Image: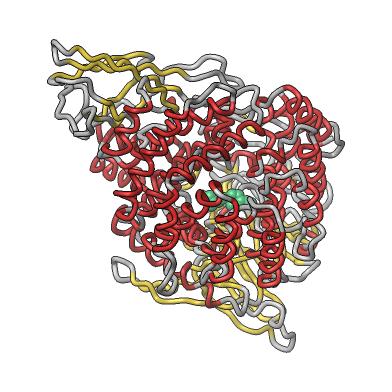
Amino acid sequence: MRTDVAQIVRLEDYRPSDFLIDKVELDFRLHPTATKVTATLSVRPNPSGRSDVPLVLDGDEVNLKAIALDDRTLEAGEFEANPESLTISQPPQHSFRLTIETEINPTANTKLMGLYRSSGNYCTQCEAEGFRRITYFLDRPDVLAVYTTRIEAEYEEAPVLLGNGNPVESGFVEGTGRHYAVWHDPFPKPSYLFALVGGRLGRVSKTFTTMSGREVDIAVYVEPGKEDRAGYALDALERSMIWDEQVFGREYDLDVFSIVAVSDFNMGAMENKGLNIFNDKYVLASPETATDSDYANIEAIIAHEYFHNWSGNRVTCRDWFQLCLKEGLTVFRDQEFSSDERSRPVHRIAEVKALRSRQFLEDSSPLAHPVRPIQYREINNFYTATVYEKGAEIVRMLKTIIGDEDFRRGMDLYYDRCDGRAATVEDFLKAFADVTGRDLSHFARWYAQSGTPRVSVHGHHDEAAKMYRLDLRQQTPPTPGQPTKEPLVVPIALGLVTQDGQPMDAHCERVNSRGVFVLDKTEDSITFTGVASRPVPSVFRGFSAPVKVSLDLSNDELLVLLRHDTDAFNRWQAAQTVAMRLLVSLSTGTPVSDEEMASLSSALCAFIETDALRDPAFAALALTLPSEADVAQEIGKEVDPDAIHRARKAMRRHLGNACREQLLDFHRSLAQTESYSPDAASAGRRALRNAALDLLAAADLRTGEQLASTQFETASNMTDRLASLSVLMTIPGMVRENAIAAFEERYRSEPLVIDKWFTLQAAIPEDTTLERVKRLMEHPAFSINNPNRVRSLIGNFAMLNQVQFNRADGAGYAFVASIVLRADELNPQLASRLLTAFSTWRMMEPTRRSHARRALQSIAQKPNLSRDVGDIVNRSLE
Ligand code: 0A1
Ligand code: ZN
């Protein structure tokens, strides 16, 4: 079985390719079941590779039709071909041309890698190793070639033909009903950035003038008839192009930039050179069908893929171990963009919430791995929160440590040096070491060491000497393959606040002018002078490092920070810390006094009364308690999800009652009056109003049901409609069931909206939900072949519904395991991502743990598992 033989690929085994391919000419004759591909490769021995070695090209389910070397057809014996590779044992020692003809069936391609069809259109996905499903190739990112692509198709079937680079020629093939287009991409690129699209597509476009005055035709292609939902994406693209010029000095480099939305896609989107292909969920938006968070995601992902043009495409990765080089950096760039376009503190809180719920979870699970892994069995399994989000945090820490100006100088040097090349993390760090004269070798440990460090902070005040000492200590728990850990370089942005909330003017020479102390040992102490009274320290401002923090502050001291800290992130964090303490106690049977509950709720009520309307988005975040999954992670072992659910419900009820009048007032006064706009300020008002509704319903079901059903019926946009439906989901009864039916009726022809409807139902924390989910799999809109449908119904059942996925009888695990096995036969990437929902199984209490283990074992025992699922299931069980 394939899982047993999956080779481990190791970073230490990297060596340059023995051959290079400088030029690739591709000819596609598109056909639904028999697309013919002719690839002409200009190959030469690599001077830095070995000589006198065979040429071995990668393949994956390739069907070879013919092969010629310098125009001479090769005969059996001169080469060896199977679906997985093509070997020429004695290739010429000089440059030569290899012409390879293959045939593909894009309609039968359910893996959505290589050339496939989505809603009848042709499209490709080549990262990481999909190009080898199109033709045999040196399918590795350090082989960079200039591509020319000719695409031919039935005009009726595919009037739009798109490739990488610039269009050079197009026309009809006389007398055949067929037409063609030729595209040329002058920038050498690795095969994973190759793309083509052919189909019937609507288009919105405009001309963008770059900072040096070049005109670029920017366009978004969508399903015909949905052009009116593509405007926001086009606008986000234009804003991204302007931002990258202004903030990083990076200009676009081709005459056209196209984005194509497809409805079958394994991930969010893909940065193919000049031809980004997107999951349509991250392109299409209208007030009637998309929520505020959909708009924000579209903006962020459009930016992300566009920014890859420099961080990923112009400078690419030497090998897949360097994935964070493009992904961590590009996530950092898109986060900075969103922060500039929206509210920086609010965006930072959203980033950190996502980091904690996805990356911290991964880092404490059997799937923990370094930001730069040193080995893999299946690279598709390493497009993770760790590589992306922790990778971005490393870039942010670097900027915090060296400062904005040196960061920009380092980025410029990196781009200068590495443009047109396949680079490594070392190249990246060297640019910053060279511009600052700093030794970054210790900092580099962040890339190699997995696990989330815990930093404890203890304060000691000496009133007589007016001194305040902070004792800091870091420690990282063991992770798979890394039993012992070294100290990391941890930037701590900090300040002191008086007990009544005034910023203190204390001095510590080890804190730099930007308010940052860098902890690089296991333990260290810093002393502030001129501290007359015992202060409240505000540490890790802006979440200056991806660590877990233990503070020896009382709840009352934390609540001082909520009211007064100058750092908005820490104001939010203070309330979250108090709420988390109470939730953990309530969930684990530790008594919580009424006073303790009241001190949090009265602080929050007082805060929203005075401050909420100044920044409603921030207030909405402050009113949202840590999620059930976050509480489970904090408890970390012997977790009882039912107890956590009850605790969170009780706290929401308490908070809703305590702030009732204020919440009712928000819900009334913030009702949408003018027409919908997706901007951050308007979205913030909706967020606060809907957070209020949620708490009001938690406090009193009948009030909640009444307010939510009125809002559901009168909502003028999807954000408000969905928020009210989500509140109704928590209130069993006919009102809820009628709303579910009305929503379905209204949106039955909108698959992306039906996804939201699937998700809400999958998240209902009731025993009947599993049956409901099974029933919804029979719904006409559901398809096991479509990743968005599977993720919204089954993925979200497993990821969002803590109590029902983790049912004590094991039925949730057994169900998800059965779907993983079904999906694996069609789409291994989709299956293995679903399977990662099991990464929390070891922290459950014993009954659930044994059910989960059995479900995992039932997967592991199945013959013919894909490498993707085999890898995840084996690591989960190790
Ligand atoms: N590079 C893309 C992510 C991506 C990776 C693999 C894919 O194959 C299915 C698709 C997309 C990004 O970071 O956006
Ligand atoms: Zn990316």
Whole-percent x and y of residue 809? 80, 33
Q: In this view, does 9 lie above or below 346?
A: above
In front here: 387 or 466? 466
In front here: 2 or 399? 399
Q: In this view, does 375 lie above or below 233?
A: above
User: Which quadrant: the C terminus?
Assistant: top right
Taking the view exactly as shown, the residue that stands out farthest to the bottom is 175
Q: Would residue 508 be found to the left or right of residue 148 on screen?
A: left
Quadrant in the rendering for residue 46 = top right
Whole-percent x and y of residue 705? 60, 57
Whole-percent x and y of residue 134? 70, 57
Residue at the location (23% across, 15% down)?
461
In front here: 783 or 150? 783
Taking the view exactly as shown, the residue that stands out farthest to the right is 863
Q: Would residue 713 be found to the left or right of residue 487 on screen?
A: right
Q: Would residue 123 be found to the left or right of residue 818 on screen?
A: left
Residue at the location (33% across, 68% down)?
210
Whole-percent x and y of residue 259? 53, 66
Q: Is residue 686 above or below residue 566?
A: below
User: Which quadrant: the N terminus?
Assistant: top right
Instruction: Say whether residue 69 is visible.
Output: no
Quadrant in the rendering for residue 225 = bottom right
Residue at the location (75% across, 66% down)?
36
Q: Would residue 47 be found to the left or right of residue 795 on screen?
A: left
Instruction: Please tell me how many numbered marks the rendered image carries.
Output: 0
Instruction: Say whether residue 108 is visible.
Output: yes
- Rendering colour mode: secondary structure
Residue at the location (37% across, 64% down)?
239
